[in-house]
Image (spheres, helix red, strand yellow):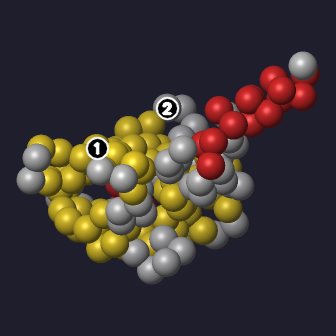
């Protein structure tokens, strides 16, 4: 019984990527963030962004089930924080409305990260991690 509960706990509470929560300034956030496959999310100082094949929480239902689609496009971004960590919300302008994603900020060494959980945790889908160098 405890093994089953442990497994369920892992499935539903997959830990974040390695790194420490970090508070970032607007200047640190307004940068180009890159994922492991070369996709980019460029957060501009004026509160707009441009994404080119960037990873995010991109699962949606199509006629055949879940489908992965990297995001390209533009929209608006804003940041918030609690006492120890910054968060970034992006709102993509899409044909049928808006697509919202919220990233959390981490730091590992000199690397800054924005990350978000992706997909179905039952399938152990990877996290979406975007990185930028600390200034």
Q: Nearer the viewer, residue 120 or 24?
A: 120
Residue under pointer 2:
82
Looking at this view, name the residue that lies furthest to the left.
95
Which corner quadrant of the image does residue 26 belong to? Answer: bottom left
In percent of width and height, residue 94 lies at 14, 54
Which corner quadrant of the image does residue 30 belong to? Answer: bottom left
Residue under pointer 1:
100
The structure residue drawn at horizontal position 65% and vertical position 32%, both measured from the top left corner, is 12
Q: Is residue 88 left or right of residue 6?
A: left
Q: Nearer the viewer, residue 21 or 51?
A: 51
Choose the circle earlier in sequence order: 2 or 1. 2
Q: CA distance from mark 2 to mark 1?
A: 20 Å
Secondary element at image label 1 = strand
The structure residue drawn at horizontal position 51% and vertical position 58%, both measured from the top left corner, is 128
2 vs 1, front mark: 1
Looking at this view, name the residue that lies furthest to the top.
1
With respect to residue 135, does 66 lie above or below? Answer: above
User: What is the total number of numbered labels drawn onto the structure image?
Assistant: 2
The structure residue drawn at horizontal position 71% and vertical position 55%, both measured from the top left corner, is 18
In percent of width and height, residue 90 lies at 29, 49
In percent of width and height, residue 31 lies at 36, 69
């Amino acid at each position: 019984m405890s093994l089953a509960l442990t497994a369920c706990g892992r499935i539903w509470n997959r830990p974040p990527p390695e790194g420490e929560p970090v508070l970032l300034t607007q200047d640190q956030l307004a940068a180009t963030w890159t994922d492991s496959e070369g996709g980019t999310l460029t957060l501009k100082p004026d509160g707009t962004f441009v994404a080119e094949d960037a990873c995010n929480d991109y699962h949606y239902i199509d006629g055949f089930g879940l489908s992965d689609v990297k995001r390209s496009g533009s929209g608006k971004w804003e940041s918030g924080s609690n006492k120890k960590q910054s968060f970034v919300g992006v709102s993509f302008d899409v044909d049928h409305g808006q697509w919202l994603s919220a990233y959390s900020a981490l730091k590992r060494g000199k690397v800054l990260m924005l990350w978000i959980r992706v997909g179905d945790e039952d399938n152990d889908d990877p996290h979406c991690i975007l990185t930028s160098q600390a200034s």
